[in-house]
Amino acid sequence: MALACDSVVGLCAAGVGLWYGGLVDRMIVDLDSVSDSEIDTADLIYGLSGIAEFIVYVVAVVAFLVWLFRVRANAELLSPGGHRRGKPWVIFGWVVPIVNFWFPKQVVDDIWYASTRDGSASKGLIDAWWAAWLVGSLVSNFAGRLLFRAEDLETLAAAARFDTVSIGLMLVAAVLAIGVIRRISSAQEQHLQATSAAPAAHGGYPAY
């Protein structure tokens, strides 16, 4: 649900970004064609859309990490020795520099395999999700740097367009992430149903 809301807000923010970039283009061609009130309104709307997008994104990230932590606990019961990274890396792998380029994907790959026993199938969905998220994050970072150092209209227009591209990539990543979530959750639910009559042989019930 959080990812779906993030996708909707992101789509709206992308539309605002395109509109804002178009307005800046008009100003580049003829500054007098845009009134001060239009500029103030555009700045306000663009700024508010960015704030709304950020808030919903944070909520979606928290919800995703909560889900990831839970399915990792389940996956450890299903395959105790099948995880390359310790449990702290389920969270810290996303924020520690350098390793955040591959640790989170390894965590999800291992959860996928432990849950589905189908490692090859992950290469399509998970790889596509990770690529979209990684490139989207890099483009978003670049757009932010452009925006904060913009001293002319051309740079401002470029920042708005890069921001729109990053939002589009994040939308793709969100849709693919929903697919990953459904596949892993469904696989683990099947294990739960298979073991619901008795405690798991390796000690306890899955932490669903």
Image (tube, rainbow, N blue to C red):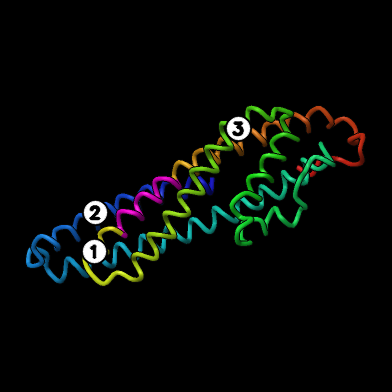
Q: Name the residue under label 2.
A: 19
- The residue under the point 42% across, 54% down is 139
Answer yes or no: do the residues labelled 1 and 2 have beta carbons within 8 Å?
A: yes
Compare marks 1 and 3 and give the one earlier in the sequence: 1
Above-or-below relation of 78 to 52: above
**Range shown magenta:** 159-170
State the separation of the CA atoms marked 1 and 2.
9 Å
Where is residue 171 shown, x and y percent of the image?
44, 44
Magenta span: helix, strand or loop, mainly?
A: helix
Q: Which amino acid does label 3 sit on?
A: Lys
Q: In this view, does 139 lie to the left or right of 156?
A: right
**Quadrant of residue 121 in the image?**
top right
Residue position for label 3? 123
Whether residue 91 sits left or right of residue 191 in the image: it is: left
Q: Marks 3 and 2, how far apart in space?
A: 37 Å
In the drawing, what numbered circle is on residue 42? 1
The Cα–Cα distance between marks 1 and 3, rounded to whole angstroms, is 42 Å
x 11%, y 64%: residue: 34
